[in-house]
């Protein structure tokens, strides 16, 4: 058995050496491409194509998710050799927004934690960050309205999306559930864990704060309190996880948007986000939707929000299948515009991988 183990380990060592050589060769080629482009070497559509191609070629035993993580980290490290990216997100460190930024861009980026979603948008608009990451909807709690409102007024474009499985944990300085007087968390997380809190911490006061990581920071200051947050926050603030996976929905996930100054080129599997308002007359909403069906375009999201004009007007947020450069999308949007008082294309971008 020892001889067999030694033989297998030697094989792994030789493969690791081959991987190291090939990774450095890849990095040098990426540098050459960066010099030829003489600009940002991050291309959302190209990176999505790379991951999809490798997932399709993967014969296992690695999972498609593992392939995505591995090659995004490789591309992140290669990018950082040429031009490290700064990514703004809802802070402080340890939030799910930070986890989404790392999932999309890899660890070889400079994270810029912001006090709120507004500041994350502003950091990108001012050029303090190259990109921003903002939550837009949760599978159990619905839309993040502040992000939708900012998209309406911001000049930023959506250039990517991230889907993150959300695992909520209860954490504190003390390693048990006894003596908890207050639970801190973001409003969305409190909503996602409502049933668990009612069953296990009935009567304990809950307080909403700006982010899960801020909740963890506050819980770290007082052993009589606890926070609902992710594993990353527990690590950042040296807290003990006293109850794991307390979200009410087992497949709880949040979708994040990647924001930049331009959207992405076509990748072959894309999504386009719009915000528009309809003329105030019967059948106006049908007029917005019918051209999509006429041009065989799938609609994956339809959300309404007050237009913030004070006159009871509403705007509609839509996600449609395809890229704004596709002929059928262009024809459909031309037809939709005839029924609109306002139409803004928020961006076209690769579907999350």
Image (cartoon, rainbow, N blue to C red):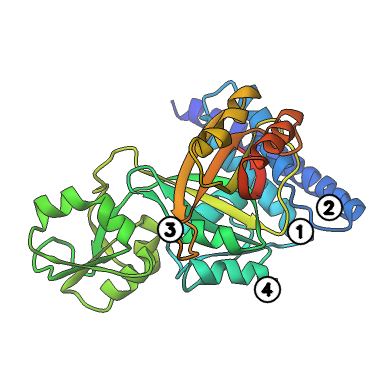
Pointer 1 residue: 81
Mark toward the start of the polypeptide (1 vs 3) = 1
In the displayed orientation, state which residue is furthest to the right: 36
Residue 186 location (% of width, % of height): 33, 63
Gap between marks 1 and 3, in whole Å?
Answer: 51 Å
Pointer 2 residue: 31
- Drawn side of residue 227 relative to residue 197, left or right: right
> Which mark lies nearer to you, 2 or 3?
3
Gap between marks 2 and 4, in whole Å?
Answer: 28 Å
Residue 349 location (% of width, % of height): 66, 43
Mark toward the start of the polypeptide (2 vs 4) = 2
- Residue 312, numbered circle: 3
Gap between marks 2 and 3, in whole Å?
Answer: 53 Å
Question: In the image, what residue occupies the spot 45% across and 70% down?
Answer: 92
Question: In the image, what residue occupies the spot 76% across and 59% down?
Answer: 81
- Drawn side of residue 208 relative to residue 129, left or right: left
CB atoms at circles 2 and 4 under 8 Å apart? no
Pointer 4 residue: 126
Residue 302 location (% of width, % of height): 48, 40
Viewer-closest of 106 and 144: 144
Query: Which quadrant is home to the N terminus?
Result: top left
């Amino acid at each position: 058995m020892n001889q067999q183990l030694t033989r297998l380990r030697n094989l792994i060592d030789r493969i690791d050496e081959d991987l190291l050589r090939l990774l450095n060769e890849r990095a040098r080629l990426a540098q050459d491409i960066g010099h030829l482009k003489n600009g940002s070497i991050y291309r959302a559509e190209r990176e999505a194509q790379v991951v999809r191609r490798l997932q399709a070629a993967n014969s296992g035993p690695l999972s498609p998710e593992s392939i995505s993580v591995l090659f995004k980290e490789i591309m992140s490290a290669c990018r950082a050799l040429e031009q490290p990216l700064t990514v703004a997100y809802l802070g402080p460190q340890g939030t799910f927004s930070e986890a989404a930024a790392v999932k999309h861009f890899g660890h070889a980026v400079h994270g810029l934690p912001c006090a709120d979603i507004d500041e994350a948008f502003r950091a990108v608009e001012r050029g303090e960050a190259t990109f921003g990451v903002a939550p837009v909807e949760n599978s159990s709690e619905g839309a993040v309205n502040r992000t939708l409102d900012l998209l309406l007024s911001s000049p930023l474009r959506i250039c990517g999306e991230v889907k993150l499985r959300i695992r909520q944990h209860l954490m504190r300085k003390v390693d048990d559930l006894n003596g908890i007087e207050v639970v801190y968390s973001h409003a969305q997380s409190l909503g996602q864990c409502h049933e668990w809190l009612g069953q296990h911490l009935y009567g304990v006061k809950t307080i909403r704060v700006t982010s899960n990581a801020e909740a963890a920071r506050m819980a770290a200051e007082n052993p009589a309190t606890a926070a609902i947050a992710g594993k990353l926050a527990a690590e950042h603030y040296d807290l003990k996880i006293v109850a794991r996976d307390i979200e009410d929905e087992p497949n709880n996930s949040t979708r994040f948007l990647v924001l930049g100054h331009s959207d992405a080129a076509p990748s072959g599997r894309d999504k386009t986000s719009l915000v528009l308002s309809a003329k105030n007359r019967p059948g106006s909403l049908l007029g917005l939707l019918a051209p999509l069906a006429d041009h065989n375009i799938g609609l994956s999201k339809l959300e309404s929000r007050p237009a913030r004009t004070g006159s009871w007007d509403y705007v509609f947020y839509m996600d449609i299948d395809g890229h704004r450069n596709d002929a059928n999308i262009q024809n459909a949007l031309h037809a939709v515009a005839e029924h609109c008082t306002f139409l803004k294309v928020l961006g076209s971008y690769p579907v999350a991988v």
